[in-house]
């Protein structure tokens, strides 16, 4: 809208040239300060045009100082932005196949999707972490399966989970070998048996001494048949409960002495 010119009202006389000229100049200046619709000169802006929230309609082109059509450029940018937004969304969430070529979305690689789940050479991160119902990529099993067990790992030849190799005692882990706990349990049982045998032997074989002992090597009362080798006389002596005393056996080197000792030890060891 053009600026309103400042004109004076002529109230008397009809030949006031000064007043008339002043009004004409004001009108001329006002028109010169107006953007014309037909493009009459000067028709250029020297300040911003405030549309007060209104739209510019029926625009063919709007060019910038370089001659670039900013309307067309804006439309192209908007299309590119929309395309990029769609592509970005697909790379984030698409799970029904590849986004482009052989590239899949972050969601597909994370939790699975067509072309990733149960696919040779692939498999989502989630399956590599926790799947226990089979292989992840047709060949290999997940971290959880190798840790605690799963289909294709538990009771499988040349396999077995870490937990099973550590603690399983109900049978072999991989069809041929047992767990560490199983072997430890067996070793403990063997140690207990060995200790019992030692206690049994020490209950009748009293070792070597310079005089008759009063108890067996377990600290228990002597019983008939308990014996020891007397290093002072080089004679094996046997205890007799009837007389509560030791009697001589054979001297060292006699035929009876080693045979008798060997027989007694063989009986004790079973």
Image (spheres, rainbow, N blue to C red):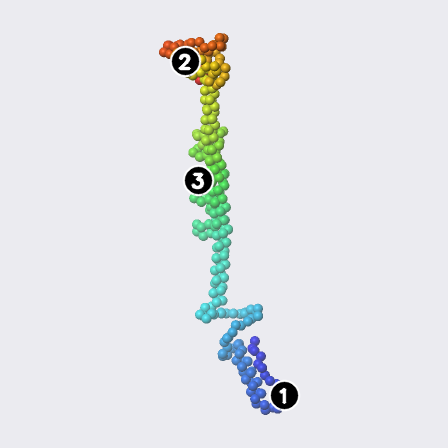
- Depth check, front residue: 58 or 63: 63
Q: Position of residue 125 (x, y in %)?
A: 48, 45
- Mark 3 and mark 2: span between their CA atoms? 72 Å
Q: Is residue 9 left or right of residue 223?
A: right
- Above-or-below relation of 50 to 208: below
User: Which structural element holds mark 1?
Assistant: loop
Q: Is residue 223 left or right of residue 12?
A: left
Q: Are marks 3 and 1 in contact (CB under 8 Å)?
A: no
Question: Residue at 44% of width from left, 45% of height from top?
Answer: 122
- Depth check, front residue: 132 or 118: 132
Tell me which label, 3 or 1, sits earlier in the chain: 1
- Depth check, front residue: 157 or 52: 52
Q: Nearer the viewer, mark 3 or mark 1?
A: 1
- Above-or-below relation of 189 to 41: above
Tell me which label, 1 or 2, sits earlier in the chain: 1
Question: Residue at 58% of width from left, 87% of height from top?
Answer: 19
Residue position for label 2? 230
Residue 11 badge = 1
Mark 2 neighbour density, 10 Å: few (under 14) some (14–19) many (20 or more): many
- Above-or-below relation of 260 to 113: above
Q: Nearer the viewer, mark 3 or mark 2?
A: 2
């Amino acid at each position: 809208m053009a600026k309103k010119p400042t004109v004076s009202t002529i109230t008397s006389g009809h030949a006031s040239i000064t007043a008339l000229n002043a009004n004409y100049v004001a009108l001329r200046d006002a028109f010169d300060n107006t953007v014309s619709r037909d493009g009459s000169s000067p028709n250029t802006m020297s300040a911003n045009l405030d549309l007060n929230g209104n739209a510019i309609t029926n625009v063919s082109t709007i060019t910038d100082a370089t001659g670039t059509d900013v309307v067309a450029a804006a439309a192209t940018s908007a299309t590119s932005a929309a395309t990029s937004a769609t592509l970005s969304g697909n790379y984030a969430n698409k799970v029904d196949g590849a986004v482009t070529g052989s590239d899949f979305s972050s969601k597909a690689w994370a939790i699975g999707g067509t072309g990733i789940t149960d696919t040779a050479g692939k498999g989502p991160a989630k399956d590599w972490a926790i799947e226990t119902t089979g292989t992840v990529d047709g060949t290999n099993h997940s971290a959880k399966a190798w840790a605690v067990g799963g289909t294709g790992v538990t009771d499988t030849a040349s396999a077995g989970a870490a937990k099973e190799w550590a603690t399983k005692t109900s049978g072999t882990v991989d069809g041929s070998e047992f767990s560490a706990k199983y072997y430890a349990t067996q070793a403990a049982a063997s140690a207990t048996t060995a200790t019992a045998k030692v206690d049994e032997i020490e209950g009748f074989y009293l070792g070597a001494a310079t005089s008759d002992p009063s108890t067996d090597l377990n600290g228990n009362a002597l019983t008939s048949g308990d014996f020891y080798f007397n290093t002072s006389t080089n004679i094996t002596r046997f205890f007799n409960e009837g007389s509560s005393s030791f009697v001589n056996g054979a001297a060292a080197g006699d035929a009876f002495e080693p045979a008798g000792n060997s027989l007694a030890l063989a009986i004790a060891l079973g």
